[in-house]
Amino acid sequence: MGALTLRLPSLSSIFIPSSFSSRSTAILRRRNHHHHLQPTIRFCTRSASSAETSASTPTSTTKPKSQDKVITPRSQDFNAWYLDIIYHAELSDYGPVRGTMVIRPYGYAIWESIQDYLNVKFKETGHSNMYFPQFIPYSFIEKEASHVEGFSPELAVVTIGGGKELEEKLVVRPTSETIVNHMFTQWIQSHRDLPLMINQWANVTRWEMRTKPFVRTLEFLWQEGHTAHSTPEEAEKEALQMIDVYTKFAYEHAAIPVIAGRKSKVETFAGADRTYTIEAMMGDRKALQAGTSHNLGQNFSRAFGTQFTYENGQRQHVWQTSWAISTRFVGGIIMTHGDDAGLMLPPRVAPIQVVIVPIWKKEEEKLGVLDAGISTYEALKSAGIKVKFDDSEQQTPGWKFNFWEMKGVPVRIEIGPRDVLNKSVVISRRDIPGKQGKVFGVSMEPDVLVSYVKDKLDEVQASLLSMATSFRDSNIVDVTSYEELKAAISDGKWARGPWSGSDEDELKVKEETGATIRCFPFEQPQGTKTCLMTGGPAEEVAIFAKSY
Amino acid sequence: MGALTLRLPSLSSIFIPSSFSSRSTAILRRRNHHHHLQPTIRFCTRSASSAETSASTPTSTTKPKSQDKVITPRSQDFNAWYLDIIYHAELSDYGPVRGTMVIRPYGYAIWESIQDYLNVKFKETGHSNMYFPQFIPYSFIEKEASHVEGFSPELAVVTIGGGKELEEKLVVRPTSETIVNHMFTQWIQSHRDLPLMINQWANVTRWEMRTKPFVRTLEFLWQEGHTAHSTPEEAEKEALQMIDVYTKFAYEHAAIPVIAGRKSKVETFAGADRTYTIEAMMGDRKALQAGTSHNLGQNFSRAFGTQFTYENGQRQHVWQTSWAISTRFVGGIIMTHGDDAGLMLPPRVAPIQVVIVPIWKKEEEKLGVLDAGISTYEALKSAGIKVKFDDSEQQTPGWKFNFWEMKGVPVRIEIGPRDVLNKSVVISRRDIPGKQGKVFGVSMEPDVLVSYVKDKLDEVQASLLSMATSFRDSNIVDVTSYEELKAAISDGKWARGPWSGSDEDELKVKEETGATIRCFPFEQPQGTKTCLMTGGPAEEVAIFAKSY
């Protein structure tokens, strides 16, 4: 075996959750699952309070074999809740290498819906998909000074290839600006080759120390757009256009009311002139940077000699942008919309939009109920609705109600023997607990039902955005002094206030409060402003928050 | 920088084409492009004979600035032709690391069409997409004995992460059976968890020594399906089902008449009990293994302890399959359908199915011609046809004809002043050169035109499959003795003959002729057979050929 005989890695290596307080319980819970959990009780009933949403049907007749497998209530321990949901809803699992993540079908389907939305928008705005190699010569990373400073601590490096020590060590891409510019330099000659606007869907690797499923993993999936332009104005317009695409995506598709704005110099991407960001407020009120768009200026084109020729023969370096959204966004969806009962998915990202649960007690009721279930399933499916008919006989209807609520399915249809007689169904909304969210006697007639369900899905979509917006707005505090800022942050809220402080002032806030400038929002209040820190005049308000 | 300061790699490192004879010219040609080529003459007119397809319009008025930039005729040097096409049609480019490939938008769009087709079929047959990490502990690879033997010479190994030498060295996935089984072992408990049927779209790395764009690259893109079953029969059925999906894909979508069959023991995947394959005949009559489906038996489940419990409580190892198609298939499409004029794409994979070229000489003709061009473009586009309106004024119509033929666009529409008067267009087929492929006076009326164009696209699709089938069939020789086999192979053909030889016999054929058993085809002739090598009885015919 020679040089290739490597050491046996420790298979017990696992994620280090970012909240150490919940670490040991999370590990224990996980170990229990893998070693003792029977497959039929992968999900167990939750607390009585959350079961009240299914009051009209028998619940919990499947006896939980192990009472500690409940989902930690979100209100009790946000991080434990998050890890429980990830596990029980089968969104992802831990890879064998510390910090890596296996994205399971249910989680991957959410990512596919993100891809489907963005791919259309990227193409509409003139970008083409392509693919760059993931191995980058280390010297490339060194060419742009601030880039290497930002990324070198996080690199994974290939040193052995084909059984031999490599002469040229290779970086596994942490981002592709360098290799993109190496290629752009070959493809761009004249102003007629510009703008050059491309995108790739790819995996990237960053050697993160503190990881958390979806939010921060050693390897993750993303799209990275890269463009080159013949004027700085065009590059700026592109960077802004793409943060706008992301903003609309967050609102329209993921029902996340992000705040779009500009990063401070301290928080700007390593190698960019300006970074635009969308910042989302999670359920624990921490901020999540959910997407970024960078105006790279000529930083990379100068480092790589990416030049074009004007019509008059003059040579000039191109102006560039790059922009990305990653699987981290899936974590953002989970942490924005979940509740104590589990996941709550906006219909537009939900892998299953509607679940149909048949209910019968006597054997003679079964056929009619199942028939009605199948017809309903077919009607919804042929209308393009993502529907699941849960006709398994392993579990009670009550168990299924809890299970699919925990999985975040936006709309549930119940069909019992009385419904069959009445040619109607019962419809429940995931976002409104209990009887308030339930409508009885909705006609089974396909056209009527399909249109009713579509409306309901739209309502749930709008309701989730509206709830998240209220939550966000009630947790942003306008501050005028550093004292107020500190109070807001220590209350767990976001602080918004005028800022013209120095980089040092900004780092001081971070040290003393744990909060950073998330952005200077595009939406700015009118009037003169006084910097909350220096008392000098300020042009803009900034938003400060603790973040993931 | 410390441990992270690595050596400057040689940037002149490039692909080693598999045919050394054309290596130096290919390198020269490539260098010329990068250093001297003006962007406006990235593609230059070809030989007079191939220009005759555009006889009715002026050609070559853009004077080629550098006569050596023509596409090498396919009939003259297949490998040089292939590399020329890859470059001029902008399908891919060479990455900075030897053996890596940048897939450019035009090439990537072909891959996207492959993804779109297969994704639907995979989901129809019950598979879900997901994603596994690409870093695999080396010990995993070692667990299955023949797997490590097959893959260890080709591994890329990460030894540095986050600036530190890793205790656990990591393999960059060459394929994912090992990590998949590691996870399956955690997810599968009972027979109710089976079948487990998943797929992932991912990049994979194999440290290949002799590379060629698309056909064999250090990193490539693929899909890999992985399934686990509770009976060996079910696994066998799945492996056969997926090779059938691939076969239909090749015929229906890519117009490639592959031959499906079983690999010999020598050629079976490292870790499989049986490998099924689709083998395609390229334009130079070499075989390309275009997709494989493996019945893995219990090899990986035994190595990783992937077990399930029957209803009676007994434990059993699962039976598994894996199956893959990669970006190599794009190379197969290029090498099946091209001709001396360039690429020829089946309409179903073509990124551009129809190109519209407006033709005018006098300024007063321009507006009418462009207007008609735009209307035609809109009509086809809204009918879902992938259409390009080439209204650039940099190039003559003749140049455009050649350019889009070289790019393999299946159908061309020409619109000149006389066509505008007659409310008609001229339609040319890429697969039929010259006037034979041209139809004058096709009505511009949208409904008529759309339906005419759709029919033409179907005709081209069918014609490409038919041409490739004739070519294939006229190049397979039925042989009954080793002498006949040697003669067939030395004629550059495929040899098909009864075979019951040993592994040693098979290796002898390879040594003496350069040909290998491509497969035992599913379609077998009737009657008793006598082994061409041993003279003993044979149950099957095998196909022998040289291959990529």
Image (spheres, coloured by chain):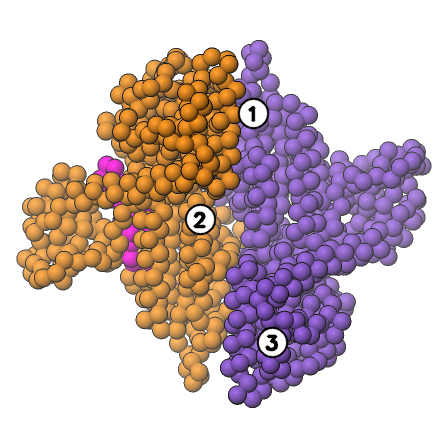
Chain colours: A orange, B purple
Q: Residue placed at 52% from the left, 72% from the top?
A: B374
Where is mark 3, residue-wise? B423
**CA distance for labels 3 and 2:** 42 Å
**CA distance for labels 1 and 2:** 29 Å
Which element is circle 1 on?
loop
Q: Amino acid at mark 2?
A: Gln
x and y percentages locating residue B439 in the rendered image: 70, 72
What label does residue A115 carry, if any?
A: 2
A121 to the left or right of B429:
left
Give the answer, above or below, for where A358 lies relative to A103: above
x and y percentages locating residue B226 in the rendered image: 58, 35
Give the answer, above or below, for where A371 lies relative to B502: above
A281 to the left or right of B3:
left
* The C terminus of chain A: image quadrant: top left
Which element is circle 3 on?
loop
What label does residue B194 carry, if any?
A: 1
Q: Are marks 1 and 3 on the same chain?
A: yes
A475 to the left or right of B20:
left
Instruction: Please rate how many residues cluster around mark 3, counting C-alpha atoms within 10 Å: few if below 14, some from 14 to 19, many from 20.
Output: some
Instruction: Please rate how many residues cluster around mark 1, counting C-alpha atoms within 10 Å: few if below 14, some from 14 to 19, many from 20.
Output: some
Q: Residue placed at 49% from the left, 47% from the top?
A: A158
Q: Amino acid at mark 1?
A: Leu
